[in-house]
Amino acid sequence: MSFVYVVTKSSPPVLVGPSEPTPAVTIRPTSADMSRLGLSFTSFHVFEGRVHEPAETIRRALSRALVHYYPFAGRVSGGDGQDVEFSCTGEGVGFVAATAKCTLEDVRFLEAPLLIPLGDLAVGYGAQCRVSDPLLMMQVTEFACGGFVVGVTWNHGLADGFGLAQFLCAVGELARGLPSPSVVPVRNDESLPDIPQLFNLLRQSAAGFKCEHVDFAYCDVIIPWSFVSRVKAEFSSRVAGRRCSVFEVVTAAIWQCRTRAIDGHRGSAVAPLVFAANVRKHVGAKDGYYGNCITSQLVAATGDALADGDIVDVVKLIKDAKERIPELLATKQLAPVVDDGLVEALCGYRALYVSSWAGIGLDVVDFGGGRPARVMPNMEVKMVPTCAPCLPCSRKDGVGVNVIASCVTDEHVDVFRAELARLFSGDPI
């Protein structure tokens, strides 16, 4: 039975503003904010627990939360040669209530293959966020079983994933009856040093490259714990005195297998990996800071080295890059010389961009019916291959690590899955 197009939205998005007057100030974006300004991401939260009138309950809590997080209710100002700022106008965020004529079980809690398009469960910008667009939009979809899905789409320039999680936790606390959020939010932190950004460097170097939406295949995969444990043990035995993380193992597996899928064993050109890193502890960000406080770390390797290499060696490349982050922040040296060949690779199909959603707080969002049964990401406009490993609240946590990737096209998706299966089984290349 197909459940496609069963979501009914109550109306076009309405604006939800702060429930009380808020300061009419402007905020100057940092370099980290500017590197992601206009990029939109969506976070989906699937809840089994019932909440009385979830859409209305969350809408009221959202309005109260915007008193504390009033920049979310503002707009971008400037651009076209003018200084860009966040204007705290209080205009509000977009909000939609919706219903689905099926249960969460009917659609397998949004496991692949998707029976409801993710676009039906969220409000999208349609393309890159415009100056006049709300900085955040939310849709609450109630299912016939009483469960619901909250889809939150936001302009990444205002907040990173940690900041979004902090904001949603605040909405949840207010929905549960707390008088105020437990974390005091901070959006301006003048003590923060300038955080070097690879994306800013790319924008300067890649003026001649065209970035357009690509129809990547949607991959929702599980990396078995047996494989993760085996690689971690091998790493510890071969690299004396060091241990690797789940993120490093999972990212290495995706990076190697997609390289094999698109290159076979003949790729000699660079196949770069770029992963996001939270640097709050490195730069001394204030508690409660919810602006962008991340950098992007580059790992460059040739396609043949990745495809033919041992998985432990690939893990070591990623771990070494992570351990260099404090030094790179201090020296502001993001990468080796970024020549035209590397820029072309970073703007194309050979690159892989990774952002882990583990440990950032999205798993503890609670609007009154308990924590989410599932958390998953999506990008409305996909221009480069991406991967979100280590997703929290997977319904298969006991089996393995959940990864959602848009990193190969339909042409290569079957080979990509086959390479993953072979890697997990331990079969030789």
Image: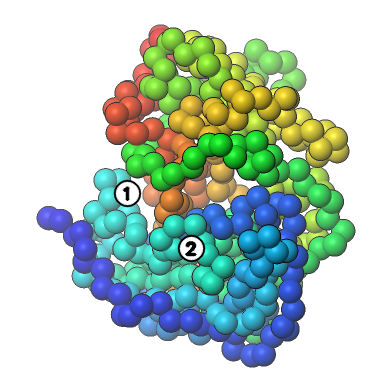
SS type, badge 2: strand
Q: Position of residue 293 (x, y in %)?
A: 71, 52
Instruction: Report helix, strand or loop for mark 1.
Output: loop
Q: Position of residue 27 (x, y in %)?
A: 74, 69
Residue at 70 percent of width and 67 percent of height: 85
- Mark 1 lies on residue: 111
Image position, residue 373 (x, y; %): 42, 58
Which residue is under mark 2? 153
**Which is in the foreground here, disc 2 or disc 1?**
2
Which residue: 49% across, 32% down?
348
Residue drawn at the location 59% of the way across and 19% of the way down: 301
Q: Position of residue 337 (x, y in %)?
A: 72, 25
**In front of the other: 57 or 240:** 57
Give the amino acid at mark 1: Glu
| Identity of the residue drawn at 40% across and 77% down | 13
Q: State the scheme by which the image is colored.
A: rainbow
> Quick check: can you spot residue 315?
no
337 left or right of 190 in image: left
Q: Quadrant of the N terminus?
A: bottom left
Task: State whether residue 15 is above or below residue 255.
Answer: below
Q: Residue furthest left?
A: 1
Which corner quadrant of the image does residue 259 belong to? top left
